[in-house]
Amino acid sequence: MRVNADYETFSSQRGGILMSHQRSEMQLARASLDTMINMDAPLHMQLRREHMPYFTPAYLRGLTDRVEGEVTRLLDAMAKQGRVDLVQAVSAHLPLFTLCEILGVPVEDRPKFLTWMHFLELANSFAAERSGGGGGLESAAAEVPPEMKAFLDAFTASIQEMFDYGRHMLHKRRLDPQADLMSAIAMAQVDGDLLADEYLDGSWLLIVFAGNDTTRNTISGAMQLLSQFPEEKAKLIAKPELMPNAVNEFIRMISPVIYMRRTATRDVEVAGQQIAEGEKVIMYYGSANRDAAVFADPDRLDVTRANADKHIAFGYGPHTCIGKRVAQLQLEAVYRQMLARFPDIHQSGPMDVAPNNFVYAIRSMPVEFTPEG
């Protein structure tokens, strides 16, 4: 928490928050450094302030009914099947619906976001394959098998389409601003100037990825937890009013963002460890959220845990996730409705997790339940 909070000593801007940017697709790597999350004060707060109106309690009250309606629609679509992949049925769709509602994305454009998110979650795979598992890019290129080349080409094309779309829509909003987050991003200023295109790319990447990925993976991960701890699931079915606290407990245990990195701006000591100026400090959120000194029996799901809201899965300090309440309201809506309609729903097979060291990227979560009707 000290490292999260002290941006003057532990910088996001000096070197970025990821362990490696340079091995990814070129525009993706550059944009990942030009995001609000990779900035320190005062630039960070100038950009964050522009986003805030779309994450206030007043705005979210108007969003909640739309989220609840979309959850109902998604559950209706799976209700008679009895067996589905929860990722494909719910987890991949709800966060993108919510994000697109906040951004103001036209309905006809929204399917593109599913494809973009598929490839963004595979960015680590792209980097590994492109470098030949650690070798040079040029020497590895000649040895890439056809199926891998097809993946690399599709990845690059999808990422390029995502940035092209973002720039087009953001410039369009500058000419014709709307009451949406996309216009707020387009009209954001730093030191009185509109953002240059590279910073628009960064803002677009951050909102598309962060506005979707953590919620998507917590929806799926929570199903595994409830299947592993059926007595806690029974409590939620009996007392749905426990859901807000349960959602915090889900988030604590899943910790969908694995780590963030900071760079020391001066020589400093943390917990007896000497850290020199320029050295990197990695914060592993899952470790903190299962600290037995803070959370009793930390590996057990407890939907009544009194301090479940003390997790730091959304970060801490100036970089606390601005959209955390949006994530919470989606998770509450999904599990309140799902357990009411499908009380026997459970994980029915192994889940598939994408190779990704930054987020807990669940690609598949098979579930079974008694069909309706």
Image (cartoon, grey):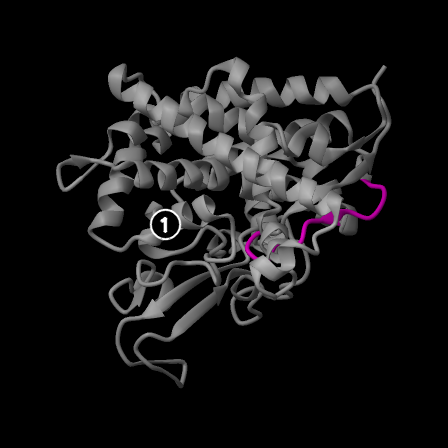
Q: Position of residue 259 (x, y in %)?
A: 50, 60
- Residue closest to the eye, 42 or 4: 42
- Magenta span covers which residues? 347-359
- Circle 1 crowding by C-alpha within 10 Å: few under 14, some 14–19, many from 20: many
Residue drawn 31% across the image and 23% down it? 171
Residue drawn 74% across the image and 49% down it? 145
- Residue closest to the eye, 342 or 349: 349
Q: Using residue 132 as the reference point, say whether residue 46 is left or right of it.
A: left
Q: Using residue 233 as the reference point, say whether residue 33 is left or right of it.
A: left
Residue 312 visible, this orientation: yes
Residue drawn 41% across the image and 58% down it? 17
Rendered position, 36 above or below 201: below
Rendered position, 68 above or below 28: above
Determine which residue is flagged by label 1.
37
The secondary structure that most of the magenta stretch takes on is loop
Using the rendered view, name the quadrant where residue 349 is placed.
top right
Q: Using residue 152 as the reference point, say whether residue 321 is left or right of it.
A: left
- Residue closest to the eye, 52 or 340: 52
Q: Position of residue 93 (x, y in %)?
A: 62, 28
Quarter of the figure with the C terminus: top right
Q: Position of residue 121 (x, y in %)?
A: 60, 45
Using the rendered view, name the quadrant where residue 13 is placed.
bottom left
Quarter of the figure with the N terminus: bottom left
Name the kind of residue labelled 1 in the image: Ile
Say whether residue 363 is magenta: no
Q: Position of residue 162 (x, y in %)?
A: 49, 32
Q: Using residue 270 as the reference point, say whether residue 19 is left or right of it.
A: right
